[in-house]
Amino acid sequence: HIVPSAPVVPQNDPTLLFTNAGMNQFKDIFLGNRKVQYPRVADSQKCIRVSGKHNDLEEVGRDTYHHTFFEMLGNWSFGDYFKKEAIRFGWQLLTKEWGLDKNRLYATVFAGDAKDGLDPDNDAADEWKQETDIDPKRVLAFGKKDNFWEMGETGPCGPCSEIHIDRGPEYCDSTDPDHVCGVNAGCSRFIELWNLVFIQYNRDKQGVLLLLPSKHVDTGAGFERLAAVLQNKVSNYDIDLFEPIINRIAELTGKDYTVGETGVAFRVLTDHIRALSFAIADGAIPSNEARGYVLRRILRRGARFGRVLGKHEPFIYKLVAPLAETMGDAYPELRQRQEYIERVIRAEEESFGKTLDRGIELFEQKVQNVLALGKSVFPGSDAFLLHDTYGFPLDLTQLMAEEKKLTVDVEGFNREMKAQRKRSSMEKASGYDTLNFESEKHSTFVGYENDKINTKVLHYEDGRLVLEETPFYAESGGQIGDRGRIFNDNFQFRVEATRYIGENIVHFGSLLSGEKPKSGEAVNAEIDRVARRATERNHTVTHLAHAALRQVLGDHVHQAGSLVHFDHMRFDFTHFEKVKDHELKEIETIVNEHILNNHTVQWQVMALEEAKKKGAMALFGEKYDERVRVIEINDLSRELCGGTHVKATGQIGPFVIVGESAVAAGIRRIECLTGFKALRYLNACRQDLETAAKIAGCPVAETASRFETLLQERKTFEQELDSLRRQTIKIKIQQLLSQSFEKNGIKIVHAEIHVPDVNALKASGDLLRDGLGSGIGVLAARFENKGNFLCVVTQDLKLKAGDIVKKVAQIAGGSGGGGPHMALAGTKDVAKIDLALSKVKEIIGQMINEGKDT
């Protein structure tokens, strides 16, 4: 059975940031948690390897075969065939169907591992010799590192048998003088083509290997590597799949794809555009957290290599088109979301591009400092400065340092990061992440049906109370935890917040009276009903808003986070531009229509796979159990959600959007109110409108048009007033010019004038300078109980306005300065303005005489 690729963004596996192997989507089958529908399966899986155990990011571009994104071709047997058939099928496909020379092929098998108590895989070695005509000398045994496959630190795993090909001595790229070519010897002559994994074990959290209920086969072959061999190409990047992207980079940069540094940049960009595009198409978005940060690292690494090719403006987004054209038939999501992918990448390029060049310049300066001191380590504090100020991920700084033959002080970087987190209060309060008790019992939430219950105390310490059962919802999924009270005849405990610690629901608060609660003690637990009902209104409306956003803006919209509070709701979503005012109004109207229709809100618990088949939307990155709670509102919304909700949409009351803003590139946020909060907000808006109508002297319905008229009238009055001021200033300047006096043949004017602001004072100075012809003018004015001096000097004189105004202001206890022909100064002592002006003639005379002396 041919199955489609799973999304590259896992929706229900908290152990993975990205799908990194073909087996990810079959994990539950291997563990026996899902029934086998088809015992034999084939697929091509989209994979990204950029973090954790399988991390190829640092190697990409340096060689010809590493990728962050690649396709993994897979054949699968779920409890059906095993080693014998897998080995026979693999050999037949490679040698007969694809025609590879069997004398160039090698097989490897697992040599065993004493630490894990595993014997050598003699069965696989025997099957190679019995089921194929491979030369027995070409069946080689290797240890755990090469021939025991594991997806991660935990999960399904088993010994594997790899098939390698000898491409010839000319393919060896080792620089080690003692190097000897061979399988797993570290050069490009011998490369792995296919891995036949025999899934037999599950490694638990303690690292122990447990036998699985059934034995399975997971075979994986890298599509790009196979294509390179079959097309007889030296490099994976030379195959027809990459050619359109490489050609587009050449067009955009005017550079040739060579084997030097330019070749590295071409390969990095060709690889990275694939990882970025497929991840964004499947719902990921660049950000500062988790997989979003990985994408941001990839894009910023690509942007830096763009600089190597001379590109300082955004251009990486232009590589999405040739990728979609080449791979869009196999993966339609690339074409369906092409415009969105381009916009997200471009926004990130523009954001980072503003600081990249400045960061590179700073890096070069710091490198020169290091080299001047004869050192070989780039300081961790400087690496942190690049991260904190210019957005450079640590690995980007490490890459640039390595090119300079330097290493980076990672420990120093981490110390700076830790100190910043402490300063920003980002670290959790001490003692709030653990509880000092052990119990087989764990808290059970019963708050979907109950606001108040009788229950028993499990544990109490330092303002934290754990109950056997609780109606208090613990903060999760964006919804805040409940408040309320827990009490009996012996004590009163106020619950101020409810959160998870491990599997326990913990009530944080204050003991108001009585003795400390004791384990086993019977108590009453009662939530704050008013706050819970308001929170439920705000949670249900997130589902309605999500549906309305997708209806108005498009199917590219996905939830990217939320806060459900009793006071308000905020909802983050993927979108590439500001939501227009008319779109916000349409969204608001749609939500209110659904509220007025009073749709029933239904929920049921079902298997995760069943929920997916029904089209229930999952929040990317959210952890879901095998059994999930599905919230369904009519035919409008169907989402996986563990939060509390109203029973019908009519209980939400009015809904208003009070804000829209950007959170990150490609992420927008709306802030909303419901119920009584919305009602109070609308009443306040109405009161303001009625007050404005009274001031304007018109009916409420005519307020907007009335204020438009008033504003236009004001604009006209201001223009007329400005014209009168200019005329008045001209008259005043003419009077001052007629009263001017001369000093050493230089015409001088000084006076205080009345003008509304500094701009008017400067305009007066311009008029005065023009009228002087040749001379000096000093004007004073008062604004907001401060004195201001302006000096103007005509072009023909050598005296400088800045020097003159500075000396005048000093008489009044002020300071200032400026250019040679106009300068400003100020003083707080307005009482000394007249004194300062009276000294102008003397100051200028002294400066003229000093000029003669020199």
Image (cartoon, grey):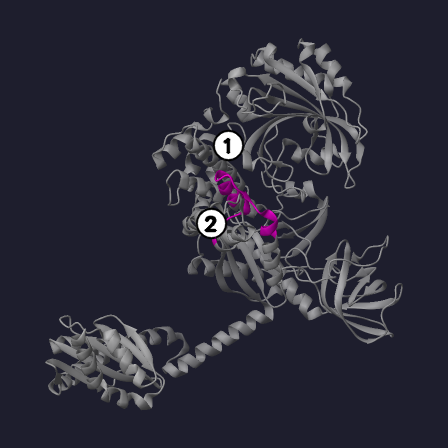
Query: Which quarter of the rendered picture does the C terminus lie within?
Result: bottom left
Q: Nearer the viewer, residue 616 or 396?
A: 396
Q: Residue at x 60, y 19 (%)?
A: 180
Q: Position of residue 258 (x, y in %)?
A: 41, 28
Q: Is residue 245 visible?
A: no
Asked which quadrant contains residue 783, the reply is: bottom left
Q: Is residue 203 above or below residue 528?
A: above
Q: Nearer the viewer, residue 39 or 139?
A: 139
Q: Is residue 406 left or right of residue 414?
A: left
Query: Which quarter of the rendered picture does the N terminus lie within?
Result: top right
Q: Position of residue 147 (x, y in %)?
A: 70, 25
> Any magenta on residue 404?
yes
> Any magenta on residue 669?
no
Kindly indicate whether the residue at mark 2 contacts the one at mark 1 (C-beta within 8 angstroms): no
Q: Position of residue 594 (x, y in %)?
A: 56, 58
Magenta-tinted stretch: 390-414
User: 10 Å neighbourhood of mark 1: few (<14), some, or many (≥20)?
Assistant: some
In this figure, which residue is indicated by the disc labeled 1? 62
Q: Is residue 783 above or below residue 195?
A: below
Asked which quadrant contains residue 158, the reply is: top right
The label on residue 710 is none
Extreme residue toward the right, this view? 520
In this figure, which residue is indicated by the disc labeled 2? 369
Q: Position of residue 802 (x, y in %)?
A: 26, 74
Q: Alpha carbon of mark 1 to alpha carbon of mark 2: how far?
A: 27 Å
> Amino acid type of disc 1?
Arg
Q: Is residue 775 above or below residue 785?
A: above
Asked which quadrant contains residue 565, the reply is: bottom right
